[in-house]
Amino acid sequence: MTRHPNLLDSNHSLLVVIDMQARLSAAMPEQAVQSMTTNTARMLTAAQILGVPVLVTEQYPQGLGATTRDITDHLPPGAPVFAKTGFSCCQAAGFNQALLALGRRQIILAGQEAHVCVLQTALELLHLGHQVFVVEDALCSRLSSHMLSALQRMAQQGATIVCHESVLFEWLKDAAHADFKTISSLLR
């Protein structure tokens, strides 16, 4: 049976972690940051187990600092980190080349702020012909209304809005997968 083309496949997926930096997170609602961080860490752990590549961006790291340790502790070895000043990840030097070199068409986005960097990245990736999946429970913005409007706009433009558990189970495809118990245990 052929799978629906809008289901994620670990062999075609790439996870992009956008600007999860402490100084930026300090401006966000604490509960939203905790959810974003926990759910992103789960996806990163599963990505490492399943061989899904990861790219990381940092918005103006000289001023906002590096990616938080809660995230870097879960990154696969050698995951590239791209510094940027442009809001879209596609504006970071080397980012588009890394996308091209990896050859993955399903791009999964997690990060902050949903209505700025995540939104602009999603729209540019869609324009470049990628399938874009935005993980709604691995995002945050300073205001929930900003996040909601960003999710609506991204969906209107063709991005698929998903939750992190959907990502994990779509990557697995089947409870008979050799890593099912390990990955499903991340959700406890």
Image (cartoon, helix red, strand yellow):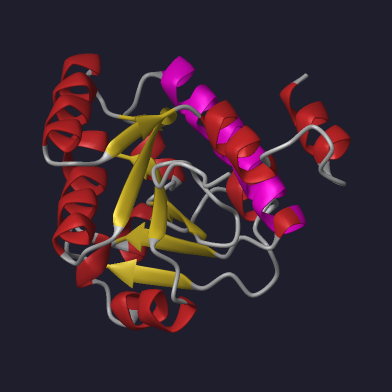
Position of 47 relative to 173 (above/below) = below
Residue 127 is left or right of residue 65, and the answer is: left
Q: Position of residue 101 (x, y in %)?
A: 44, 84
Q: Quadrant of the N terminus?
A: top right
Position of 172 relative to 74 (above/below) = above
Q: Residue at x 69, y 63 (%)?
A: 51
Residue 155 is left or right of residue 173, and the answer is: left
Q: Position of residue 29 (x, y in %)?
A: 37, 19
Q: Residue at x 27, y 68 (%)?
A: 84
Residue 36 is left or right of residue 157, and the answer is: right
Q: Which residue ends up furthest to the front in the rendered image?
A: 1
Which of the 4 image quarters holds residue 186? top right
Q: Is residue 26 visible?
A: no
The question of residue 162 being in magenta is answered with: no
Which of the 4 image quarters holds residue 91? bottom left
Span of residues in magenta: 30-49
Q: Position of residue 122 (x, y in %)?
A: 23, 50
The question of residue 37 being in magenta is answered with: yes
Q: Residue at x 35, y 70 (%)?
A: 83
Q: Residue at x 18, y 37 (%)?
A: 154
Which of the 4 image quarters holds residue 167? top right
Give 56 or 58, whichever is nearer the viewer: 56
Q: Quadrant of the C terminus?
A: top right
Position of 16 relative to 25 (above/below) = below
Residue 27 is left or right of residue 147, and the answer is: right
Count of labels in the image: 0
Position of 147 relative to 8 (above/below) = above
Q: Is residue 62 visible?
A: yes
Judged by its main secondary structure, the magenta piece is helix
Q: Position of residue 160 (x, y in %)?
A: 31, 36
